[in-house]
Amino acid sequence: MLTDLGELHSLSEALKRISGQLHEHTRELERAVEGTYASHLSDPRVQLLSKTLAVSRRADLELSRLSQLILNLQRRLEHHETAALEREQEKLRSSITVLKRERHELETLYEIARTLNSTLEFNEVLRLVMDQVISFVGAERGFLVLLNEQGELEFKIARTKDARSLERDAFNLGISQSTVNRVIQTRQPILTSNAQEDQNLKDQRSIIENRIRSIMCAPLVVRDRCIGAVYVDSRINANLFGPQQRDLLFAFCHQAAIAIDNARLFADLQRTLRQVNEDKQYMDNIFASIANGVITTDPQGVITTFNRAAGTILKLDQRAVLGRHYREVLGALPELGLVDLLQEALLHHEHGTRVPVAFEGEVAGLGWVNMNFYVTALRDERGQHIGTALVIDDRTDLKRAQAEAREIKSLFGRYVHPSVVKRLIEDPRSLKLGGETREISVISADLRGYTSLAERLPPEQMMNLLNNYLDLMVEAIWDEGGTLTAFWGDELMAIFNAPLEQDDHPLRAVRAAWKMRQAILDYGRRHPDEVPVKFGIGVNTGLAIVGNIGSRGRIQNYTAIGDTVNVAARLQSRADDNNIYLNAPTFYRVRQHVQIDHVGTVSVKNRSEPLEVMRLTGIYSL
């Protein structure tokens, strides 16, 4: 019992000071809530301020009442009114308890708001919400569910009072889901002090089976939109929750809904940014892989895109040109006229895609080029002009390849098999027209008695006879991949291992010679009425100079020159009728595949040393 008047006086003075400060704080809240934010009362944060104002007003009234009680105590103490004094003291203690509780509620709500706003990571916000609410209301466990885009409930997180996580099955089987659905539909909290005796819940199987006693559930509402609910319960204690906890949970859920919605918006923003970055990377990869050069500018003419192909075609560093004006970059290549093209597109951007512009000629730093340019205006989805795009179709390599193909066809179309021509066109680098020293195998063939036949036969008959036999010989040479390099009347020459490399060229040459012999003899047997023709063939292997020989810009011929070629011709001239002579270097390379007669050493014109010669009499396998 307070009996000391001095103590009461000190308490009265302290209450006056606190009352004055609280009264001024309440006035500031009134000006904010009923003045500055009066038009934003639907905002959960303003609602929280409104609740704080209500608590402050109640506290202000309590302090006023306390001051009056103390004054009454002072008077009664002075008049020794003991019984009345005790009643006033009890009222004072009750008021102090109410003030402490309301202060604790304010501090708790503030601390929760500060904690929930400490992160934007979605899963972390959900964990904080559940741990805070369980601690806040003293529940045994808590569940949080959110509505998805289809309006369906989705379990997000469940926690216990000892901070353990619960699995989804605990939500599906262990709580009153109908309670959650009712809260979301009505947007009003629900409190059940003893669910086992609650007539509204007696038919719910989950409550009976799991012996759930105390239940509270409150909606998560933000911007007039319900996004989910928080459910807490206890299977141990009845009457664990009361109206005070229900109101506190409801206020808590307003703040939690803001934090969850912000975290979800932040997560959506992060996903969008990742998608944008992925799309940008995807587009960058596409631009990088396009063979055509692509250059884009903004409406002011500043280059915004310059892909790798454009840098390769124009021989410019793509990193150094981005962000610079197209006049500065493309003005270094005036022959192409790109500055004028882009300038016209910027001035007349309403015309859209332009007709391709072709360019062929010499460009300083690039050499001879052949290009097509396509210029178009760029527009956004509203049709607003946002820049220009220039596409460069570099046809230089194509034109060069076509020219090389024409040259190859003109040189080899008549002398080698079409398949060889095709391979040369596919890989023109394998062809060295300028001349090179290479090991080759040479066939020299001659139809005997050509002069006497020409004297006896009419020219047309003689020409037909000659062409028939030459056709047979050419077919045999082409069949083995040989290259015809010369016709001299009734003579021909063919080489192997040029222009394409052939590791087995000696064997190819020998097989071709044998096929020529067999074809000519077979033709004679099949046409006994025609004038019989005899022949001689020589085959030699060695080094020779191979290349394109002839007048520049006039008639040229791919052929071989050197001693190896001359020896093949000498062997052919010394060969018996209808026989094939092989020089020793050729024989030694094919000896496992052929049958021969040893002719011996043979002296030939313009050779100081005789040749060791073999006559081909058969081949083991063709």
Image (cartoon, rainbow, N blue to C red):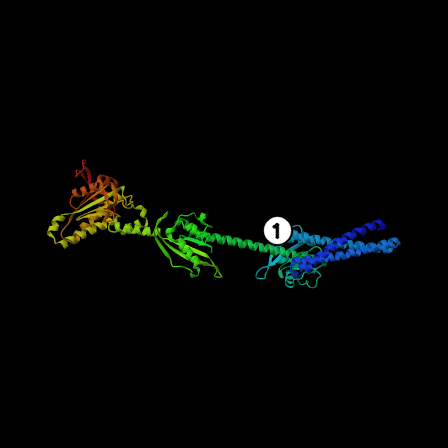
Q: Nearer the viewer, residue 566 or 375?
A: 375
The kind of secondary structure element at disc 1 is: loop
Residue name at image x 82 percent, y 54 percent: 70
Task: Using residue 464 as the reference point, say whether residue 198 is left or right of it.
Answer: right
Instruction: Tell me if mark 1 has few (under 14), some (14-19) or many (20+) residues whose alpha carbon lies within 10 angstroms of its own.
Output: some
- In the displayed orientation, state which residue is furthest to the left: 456
Q: Position of residue 446 (x, y in %)?
A: 17, 46
Residue 508: image location, x then y, percent: 25, 45
- The reply, left or right, for residue 600 in relation to residue 396 is left
Which of the 4 image quarters holds residue 171?
bottom right
For the image, the number of numbered tags is 1
Residue 240 against residue 605 in the figure, above or below: below
At a point 44% along the width and 59% down the height, the residue shown is 349
Foreground residue, 408 or 307? Answer: 307
Q: Is residue 357 visible?
A: yes
Three-letter residue code for mark 1: Thr
Residue 203 placement: quadrant: bottom right
Circle 1 sits on which residue?
A: 119
Residue at 85% x, 53% y: name it: 74
- The one nearer the camera, 67 or 149, is 67
Residue 241 appears in the picture as rendered: no
Furthest-top residue in view? 609
Q: Nearer the viewer, residue 564 or 233?
A: 564
Residue 409 picture location, percent across and down: 27, 51
Relative image position of residue 202 (x, y in whole percent): 68, 62
